[in-house]
Amino acid sequence: MTYETLTLSFDEGVAELRFSRPDLLNRFDMPAHVEFVAALEAVANRLPDVRVLILCGEGRAFSAGGDFDEMLDAHRSRAIRNDMVKYAKLVFQGVADLPIPVISAVQGAAIGLGATVATVSDIVVAWKDAKIADTHVNVGLVAGDGGVISWSQSIGINRAKRYLLTGDVITGAQAYEWGLVTELVEAAEDALPRAHALARRIAAMPAGGVNGTKRTFSRITALLAAQALSLGLDCEMEAMASPDLPETIATLRKK
């Protein structure tokens, strides 16, 4: 498959999925959703030869999340909102349920769904000054795409509430201190090499132990997702249809 929003490569048991639209801050619009899900399926189809997946981004952002124009389209169309729910579930579950370890290399901003994708990964390598935030509430939307689950699992529900109810930004260093990030690097360009070093180490270990451990952790995430993911997405789509959304987006664009 030819991709327009990402690149996918394989090298000695390690797959690398790279968000490749730095001019758009690697945003997660619908084309990116569709291609991301297809790329995860392509990785799954290469098992057991592929042992680890790395997620990374080009430029100054890992991924800056959603697209305002697409949100306005969804505001006007129930069909688009239904597609958003479908692909949001596939994105979250595709990472969480992949039966091999997933490592995110966060070299820059991870915002909204970008933060969810990074934090639902099994290992998160981040630059100490990277900006990480789930800013759904700042747009008048619900943090329904899985951030409630991934942040609560990593840093505890009380701290997750604090940051998902305000949309405040934290740094990679803060995220590392709290457990949202698991490996910290001093420079942005060090994130991907550190991720590859970890991937090579894991890929050299016996697959049965590694993959069985990942599948067991995935069960915990799946149980949480069964409780909250559908509800969160339903609430998000209700907010997407709110008459206040266009005005909120217009105000944010002026800022």
Image (spheres, rainbow, N blue to C red):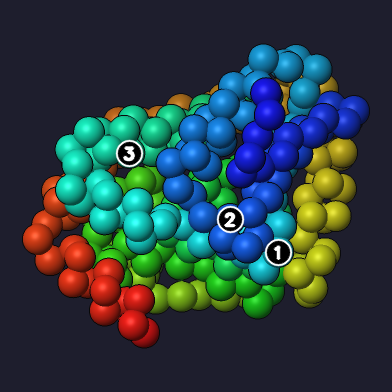
| Mark-to-mark CA distance, 3 and 2 | 17 Å
Total marks in image: 3
Left or right of residue 231, residue 174 in this image:
right
Q: Quadrant of residue 9?
A: top right
Q: Which residue is depicted at the point 79% across and 73% down?
A: 187
Residue at 73% across, 17% down = 46
Look at the numbered disc 2 and give the secondary structure of its residue. loop
Along the polypeptide, which appears first: circle 3 or circle 1? 1
Single out the residue that lies furthest toward the left.
243
Question: From the viewer's perspective, is 205 left or right of 54?
Answer: right
Q: Which residue is mark 2?
A: 26
Instruction: Please state if 54 lies on the left or on the right of 219 as rendered.
Output: right
Q: Amino acid at mark 1?
A: Gly
Q: Earlier in the sequence, mark 2 or mark 1?
A: 2
Asked if marks 3 and 1 touch (Cβ < 8 Å), the reply is: no
Left or right: 67 with respect to 48? left
Instruction: Name above or below for residue 213 compared with residue 151.
Output: above
Viewer-proximal residue, 81 or 11?
A: 81
| Residues at circles 2 and 1 in contact by the CB criterion of under 8 Å | yes
What residue is shown with label 1? 59
The front one of 175 and 132 is 132
Report the quarter where the N terminus lies. top right
Q: Disc number at residue 67? A: none
| Residue 178 in sight | no
- Residue type, label 3: Met
Quick one: which residue is furthest to the bottom in this view? 255
Q: Residues within 10 Å of mark 3 (few under 14, many from 20)?
A: many
Instruction: Determine whether 99 is above or below 175 in the image.
Output: above
Q: Position of residue 129 (x, y in %)?
A: 65, 77
The image shows residue 136 at horizontal and vertical percentages of 32, 62
Q: Which residue is mark 3?
A: 84
**Disc 3 to disc 1, C-alpha distance:** 26 Å
